[in-house]
Amino acid sequence: MVIGIIHLDLAIEHAMSLKDKRAVLNRIKDRVRQKFNVSIAEVADQDIWNVASLGVVMVSNNQKYCNEVLDQVLNHVRKIGNCEIQDWEFEYIVADD
């Protein structure tokens, strides 16, 4: 079993309130959930209106497949717009049976 994790740090320059930030994040989370079989949530910086940290997680039996899907998620978030990806980090946890 492989658990793939990507941590995204986003800048939302046009957001002037937490309401603006939530609108952008809800759009991203809804589209990523709809297109990919992953879990996504805001994991830090909840009270800062112009930055966000998202965590995306998937479980698979193949690390290569997990990596491909998380790469596609990263590219999809870039295409959605309304924010700029400042930094990202991939992590994999491999559990042997």
Image: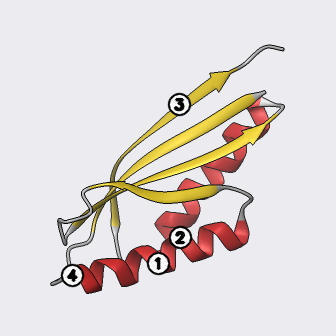
What residue is at 61 percent from the left and 75 percent from the top?
A: 31
> Which residue was labeled with disc 1?
26
x then y, percent, for residue 57:
60, 46
Indicate left or right for 56 with 88 as reference: right
> Which residue was labeled with disc 4?
14
Is 71 above or below relative to 79? above
| Mark 3 / mark 1, whichever is N-terminal | 1
Label 4 with label 1: CB-CB less than 8 Å:
no
Label 2 with label 1: CB-CB less than 8 Å:
yes
Label 2 crowding class (10 Å Cα cut-off): few <14, some 14-19, many 20+? some
| Mark 3 / mark 4, whichever is N-terminal | 4
What residue is at 21 percent from the left and 81 percent from the top?
A: 15
The residue type indicated by label 1 comes to Asn
Looking at this view, name the residue that lies furthest to the top: 96
Label 3 crowding class (10 Å Cα cut-off): few <14, some 14-19, many 20+? few
x then y, percent, for residue 18:
23, 79
Frontmost of labels 2 and 4 is 2
User: How far is disc 2 from disc 3 in space, using C-alphas?
Assistant: 20 Å
Q: Helix, strand or loop at disc 4?
A: loop
Q: Helix, strand or loop at disc 1?
A: helix
Quarter-of-image position of residue 84: bottom left
Label 1 crowding class (10 Å Cα cut-off): few <14, some 14-19, many 20+? few
Frontmost of labels 4 and 1 is 1
> Which residue was labeled with disc 3?
91
Indicate left or right for 14 with 84 as reference: left
| Mark 2 / mark 4, whichever is N-terminal | 4
Q: Which mark is residue 29?
A: 2
87 vs 22, nearest the viewer: 22
Q: Helix, strand or loop at disc 3?
A: strand
